[in-house]
Image (spheres, rainbow, N blue to C red):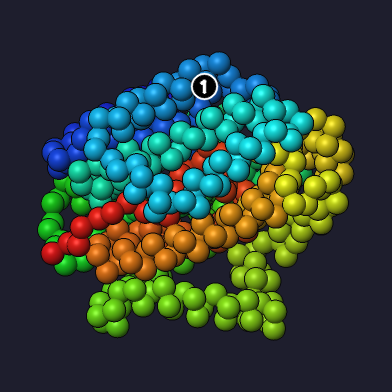
Amino acid sequence: MPPQLALLICLIFMGYLFWVDLKRKESSSNELWIPLTWMFLTGSRYASKWISMTPADTDYEGSPVDAVVFGALIAAGFFVLSRRKIDWGQFFARNKWLMLYFIYCGVSIIWSDYPFVSFKRWIKELGSPVMVLVILTDRHPVEAIDAVLRRLAILWLPLSVVFFKYFPALGRQYHESSGEQFATGVSLGKNGLGIMCLVCGIYFSWKYIVKHREKFKWDWQENISDFALMGMTIWLLQRSQSATAMVCVTVTVMLFLISRTKLFARKPDGMITMLLIFIPLFYLLEETFGVTDVILDLLGRDRTLTTRVPMWEFLKTMVTNPILGSGYHSFWMGERLDIIWGFTGRNITQAHNGYLEQYLNLGYIGLAFIVVIILSGFLKVKRQLNLDFALGMLCLCIIVSTVLYNHTEALFYGINNVWLLTLFAVTDIPIQKTV
């Protein structure tokens, strides 16, 4: 089939899926297109890359086109929030650790080697909590996140399949040394596609295992289109060979299934207790039997995580201020970057470990903030599970996936959907108990 014809058929199919979705989401507000656009661009390619269709780059200054697009979306988000009746005093009180963390990120610009670049990146990252608030302060937040995630799946998945099969220059990636082929879809790398599939996998498993567990109603148009999108998710995830995303999706499905048991139906917040027992048990098994090595062997992955462990040890030696770090989002710049590239032999721009990345950029203080935010998120979810079980389980699985994913990728900062959804999961907005 000619690539142009395949793309046309894909766009018609996507149009049909949007028609089905819009018909079923009469209560969804038009303001949700703002975070939807933001998440689509951050999860696939920035606006400048969609225009030029060029590979990713490491330019410190970024693209003026992207600055205008993201700036417009942030301004639109602020405008929406200004029209909603939000008790900001209560909001700041409930989310003080998040507020302090973003303030600390801003203050750290002072000791950055490239303060102007750090400042621009900090301003752009403030867009993530703005998008989260647009969703959470919607009249129907559960239906709002449902609508946003389903529409993202409609935009990402069919186009990714077409890019991989009919536009290999845009939808595929090859390993530098082995030449092994990976799918990238509409993203700029296999890990980007893995994150897309992770987001879609969390959404569809949540929708059918938890959200509609008691009120499921068959709608052949919506359900069949959902099943088609789920099939694309599985196929693309396998093609991307993103082992971390596969593990996170598997853990997510298991948690959703466990939540359906009678035990947790009677005591929903027991899910948090179970995790608090499981986590130290996992680390005990790790120290005793090397569970991670067994999992990596089963996945066919190198136990050194493709030479990442030696790299992590080297990066620790580059830290000059372990308490404060190098400044917000500024470690991977200048002469330090040349030294790292010389050691690794690869043009990497992150530590491939979110906890280490926080330490490099923001020191022990930044790392402590992340730990406290995660713990406060679990406490918020514990309360939420008794008020709105479906939303609480979604937030719980997002937090767990984030904790796992950041073992091999750095996603606790910057513009990415794992971090945005983490902010969604840990941000505390008062909700009413569902009947």
Q: Is residue 61 visible?
A: yes
Query: Given the image, on which type of amino acid does mark 1 rest?
Result: Asp
Q: Residue at x 64, y 50 (%)?
A: 366
Q: Name the quadrant containing residue 32.
A: top left
Q: Position of residue 112 (x, y in %)?
A: 73, 34
Q: Tag 1's secondary structure?
A: helix
Q: Residue at x 16, y 67 (%)?
A: 214
Counting other residues with Cα less than 10 Å from the Cα at mark 1, is it few (<14), some (14-19), or many (20 or more)? some
The quadrant where residue 21 appears: top left
Residue 191 horizontal/vertical position (percent): 57, 46
Q: Quadrant of the N terminus?
A: top left
Labels in figure, total: 1
Give the labeled residue for mark 1: 66
Does the image show residue 52?
A: no
Location of residue 118 with respect to 230 vertically, above or below: above
Left or right: 361 with respect to 269? right
Left or right: 403 in relation to 262 = right
Q: Residue furthest front?
A: 89
Residue at point 56% right, 41% down?
103
Depth check, front residue: 257 or 404: 404
Relative depth, front residue between 266 and 5: 266
User: Residue 382, how many percent across, how many down?
Assistant: 37, 68
Location of the C terminus by quadrant is bottom left
